[in-house]
Image: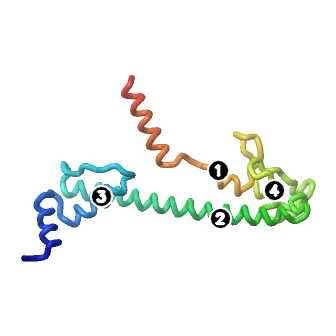
Amino acid sequence: MGCPSLARQSSIARASPHPPLLDQQLSVARLGTMGRKLDLSGLTDDEAEHVLKVVQRDMKLRKKEEERLSEMKQELAEEGSRCSILSKQHRFNEHCCIRCCAPFTFLLNPKRLCLDCQYNVCKTCCTYSKRDKAWLCSACQKGRPAAPSPESYETGGKRRELERQRR
């Protein structure tokens, strides 16, 4: 009779314009494109392979970004617990920076209050936010969103496209 999986592969190969391995990879790519399905039936093998490489590269970049954000969240959580412990020490943050533990001095290293966490920090551990007109410590600065996420970019792009179509 023959192997059923081999028979299934040969029927896939006959039904599809793409080689079986490419079909398997494309089905994986279809799952990874944020829930959208790609119709690649009208493409040549080279074009379909190029689309597959682009989708795989996108998936790899998204995974790397997720790992980076996860790592950053863990660092911020560790920093938060360290600050919590230090702040419980009697008047520690009155005399020393909560981030680097450097002592405050009146002119050389004055204390500055972080807008977000409300801890005192030294001049090397904070930056001035012109938008908020206040100081932000390095940890709170890291915790703030720096740029829009890819999803917001995509939805913003779709919104602009719809607005253009309405005109």
Q: Are marks 2 and 1 in contact (CB under 8 Å)?
A: no
Cα distance between the residues tagged 4 and 1: 17 Å
Residue designated by label 2: 75
Q: Earlier in the sequence, mark 3 or mark 1?
A: 3
Q: Earlier in the sequence, mark 4 or mark 1?
A: 4
Identify the residue at image location x=63%, y=64%: 74
Residue designated by label 1: 144
Cα distance between the residues tagged 2 and 3: 35 Å
Give the farthest residue toward the left: 1
Residue designated by label 3: 52
Give the farthest residue toward the front: 1
Q: Give SS at disc 2.
A: helix
Identify the residue at image location x=47%, y=48%: 150
Q: Earlier in the sequence, mark 3 or mark 4?
A: 3
Task: Judge from the rendering whether residue 47 lies leftward or rightward of residue 122; answer left or right.
Answer: left
Task: Judge from the rendering whether residue 112 lies leftward or rightward of residue 152; answer left or right.
Answer: right
Task: Judge from the rendering whether residue 74 lies leftward or rightward of residue 115; answer left or right.
Answer: left
Cα distance between the residues tagged 2 and 1: 14 Å
Residue designated by label 4: 121
